[in-house]
Amino acid sequence: MGNKNKLAKFAEIREFSNVFEHNEAPKGKWSSVFKNDNPIVLELACGKGEYTLGLAQLFSDKNFIGVDIKGNRIWRGAKTATDENIPNAAFLRCQIGRITDYFSHEEVSEIWITFADPQPRDGKAKKRLTHLNFIKKYIEISIKPLIINLKCDSTLLYEFTKEVIHENNFKTLVDVDDVYNWDERPEELNIQTFYEKMWLEEGKKIKYLRFSVG
């Protein structure tokens, strides 16, 4: 039953006007998708798109694209955006390691990474979305300076990202190791994904880094 449901979702997202897959992505022409020239913000490894949608609802003057390889997850975000008429949210199904295939130079203004896999096993550091190899790809498609936001429960990913920032002379804008004990917490950090709610129920602290590159 599960496989049939996945196949049905894969078929349905091909009909959504707010979902793009692989070679369908309008590289260099994303503004035409949104019919405006507002800044484009990516959420990488967006899962079901809760953060993409939440940000889009908070900031109508920006366009948001959730990126993930899992089509059955993207289906949820895309359907909600369609049902609730959120015109400044779209989704791209692709491998994040190939992000430069889908966006042109200076097409992106900001990136969010929310509760991504911290890749805890030895030898997996290069798969972390804040590894320098990934950041170099983000730089290729972004307006300078690029703003990157990391929100996570993982101390490993949080500390690893801080090392990347330090070693490459990037500029830390915000560094908070317990978001919900931060009195100055901006509204966008109140958005909660399925996984964040689960980690909070387990008593985990949520970390947040905002830094600029380039």
Image (cartoon, rainbow, N blue to C red):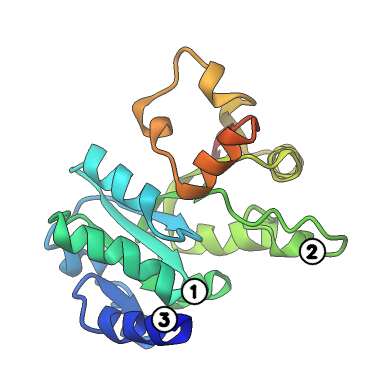
Q: Nearer the viewer, residue 116 or 103?
A: 116
Q: Earlier in the sequence, mark 3 or mark 1?
A: 3
Q: Are marks 3 and 2 in contact (CB under 8 Å)?
A: no
Classify mark 1: residues with Cα within 10 Å, few (<14), some (14-19) or many (20+).
some
Q: Amino acid at mark 3?
A: Lys
Classify mark 3: residues with Cα within 10 Å, few (<14), some (14-19) or many (20+).
some
* Separation (CA) of disc 3 from disc 1: 13 Å
Rendering quarter of residue 164: top right
x 61%, y 24%: residue: 178
Residue 113 appears in the rendering: yes
Q: Amino acid at mark 1?
A: Ile
Assign a secondary structure to mark 3: helix
x 65%, y 33%: residue: 204
Residue 166 image point, x, y percent: 73, 37
Q: Are marks 2 and 1 in contact (CB under 8 Å)?
A: no
Q: Earlier in the sequence, mark 3 or mark 2?
A: 3
Rendering quarter of residue 74: bottom left
Residue sitting at the far front? 1
Residue 185 to residue 124: above or below: above
Q: Nearer the viewer, residue 202 or 89?
A: 202
Q: Nearer the viewer, residue 190 or 5?
A: 5
Q: Which residue is mark 2?
A: 124
Residue 22 appears in the rendering: no
Residue 37 image point, x, y percent: 18, 55
Classify mark 2: residues with Cα within 10 Å, few (<14), some (14-19) or many (20+).
few
Q: Earlier in the sequence, mark 2 or mark 1?
A: 1
x 12%, y 56%: residue: 85
Q: Quadrant of the N terminus?
A: bottom left
The nearer-to-camera label among 3 and 1 is 3
* Separation (CA) of disc 3 from disc 2: 28 Å
Q: Which residue is mark 1?
A: 69
* Residue 6, disc: 3
